[in-house]
Image (tube, rainbow, N blue to C red):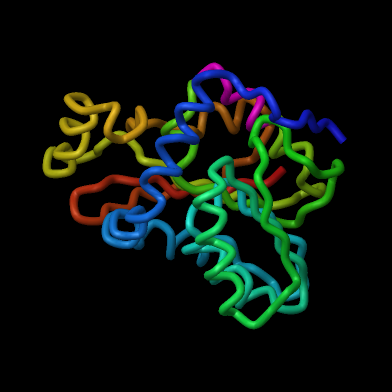
Amino acid sequence: MAYVSPLHPPASTVRTVQKYDFISAFYDIFGITMESKARDRSLELSEITNGERVLEVAVGTGINFREILRRNRDGWSDGIDISQKMLQRANKRAAKTGTDNYTLQRADCRALPYEDNTFDLLINQYMFDIMPTVDYGKIVTEFRRVLKPNGRLVIVNTTLPERPVDRTLEWIFSVYPKSFSQCRGILVRPYLEKFRFRVIRREYVVNLSFPSEVILSHK
């Protein structure tokens, strides 16, 4: 188990935690308004089978984790995030599902606290687009490590606009990057392929001019 407790995280991580602790109270407004189409599509592509072992990395306020629990009542679902206040809100959502076959804990995506070959499915949404590019290799390597052979990985990110009409938020990000915790449009497929994930499908999804990519890949 390649896990290192993030007791002394780097300064950049501390700043990210502080920002997401701060915005946790109103994150759902943005998450539901601007991200809902891509989040829903990620669940469809995940094809969760009741009884699986599922991990969501960066659960945020638990918008998707709640639905994972509903679809996987006879399995086991784990969720992690680096923001304690986000996790508090996710716990409240999860408790309302009436199931207790899950854990939610604070952990770092670069050092996942799980054994090798543990999960059938790993879901990650809107995280790579705020992470330093130099960390992508560590993160994707950890994702691959904890997935079972042929395990599924579904990732959602803010992506580069493919149409002029979708460039509104790209301009906002370029002018006010700190307000979005350094969020920017990215293309994550090359990194998945570099670390030997088989990309099965990539879809471009737009919600109110907010462009996202949804990617399904297999270990």
Instruction: Tell whether position 139 is magenta.
Output: yes
The dominant secondary structure in magenta is: helix
73 or 5, which lies in front? 5
Q: What residue is drawn where x is 65% and y is 35%?
A: 108
Q: What segment carries the magenta color?
A: 133-140
Q: List the single residue furthest toward the bottom.
A: 98
Drawn side of residue 204 relative to residue 134, left or right? left
Q: Is residue 185 above or below residue 47?
A: above
Which quadrant holds residue 72? bottom right
85 or 143, which lies in front? 85
Query: In which quadrant is the N terminus drawn?
Result: top right
Image coordinates of residue 55 in percent, x first then y, are: 68, 54
Q: Can residue 200 be seen from the camera position used here?
A: no
Q: Can residue 197 be seen from the camera position used here?
A: yes
Q: What residue is drawn where x is 65% and y is 54%?
A: 79
Which quadrant holds residue 134? top right
Image coordinates of residue 8 in percent, x first then y, are: 67, 23
Instruction: Tell whether position 188 is magenta.
Output: no
Q: Is residue 52 above or below residue 73?
A: above
Image coordinates of residue 151 in percent, x first then y, are: 73, 51
Q: What residue is drawn where x is 72% and y is 43%?
A: 219
Q: What residue is drawn where x is 54% and y is 61%?
A: 90
Q: How many marks?
A: 0
Drawn side of residue 213 relative to residue 135, left or right? left
Image coordinates of residue 161 in percent, x first then y, are: 25, 37
Q: Is residue 209 above or below residue 137?
A: below
